[in-house]
Amino acid sequence: MNFFISAAHAQQAAPQAASPMFNLLFIGGMFVLFYLILWRPQSKRAKEHRELVSSLTKGDEVLTSGGLLGKVTKVTDDYVTLQVAEGVELCMQKASVAAALPKGTIKSIQ
């Protein structure tokens, strides 16, 4: 078998494994990085959306996640009624509201 592997390569020692402390620090660092990059920003966005939805009142102008602009005419616990045109009202879940717009936005667009 000497013609496949030289004697110098066959006698080399196997590489040593990393220490357990290094492995623990590496895994801990990955969790910290995962928290800072994914969990924290997502929870911040979710909190802002919850605050937006809970602060909806009659007369607010909103943009839904589907792209509809409307004026809030009625608010209940889980649903909001939007006036999207004269005489046209849609009942939607509060969670579908993506953003609150400044007053007069709808009139300035039309």
Image (cartoon, rainbow, N blue to C red):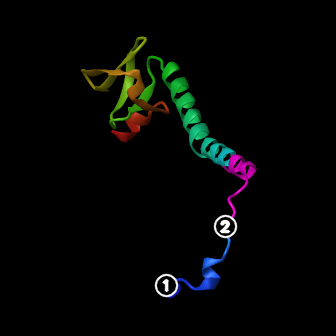
Give the side of residue 80 with respect to residue 35, left or right. Answer: left
Neighbor class of circle 2 (other Cα within 10 Å; few <14, some 14-19, many 20+) is few
User: On screen, 97 above or below 58?
Assistant: below
Do residues under tags 1 and 2 come within 8 Å of each other at their CB atoms?
no
Give the mark nearest the N terminus, 1 or 2: 1
Write down the quadrant of residue 17 in the picture: bottom right
Residue position marked by numbered label 1 in the rendering: 4
Left or right: residue 15 compared with residue 91: right
In the displayed structure, 84 sits above or below 3; it is above
Residue 24 shown in magenta:
yes
Looking at the image, which residue sits at the far left? 87
Tell me if residue 63 is in the magenta stretch: no
Q: Position of residue 101 (x, y in %)?
A: 47, 33
- Magenta-highlighted residues: 15-26
Q: In which quarter of the image is the C terminus?
A: top left
Q: In which quarter of the image is residue 108?
A: top left
Q: Mark 2 points at which residue?
A: 15
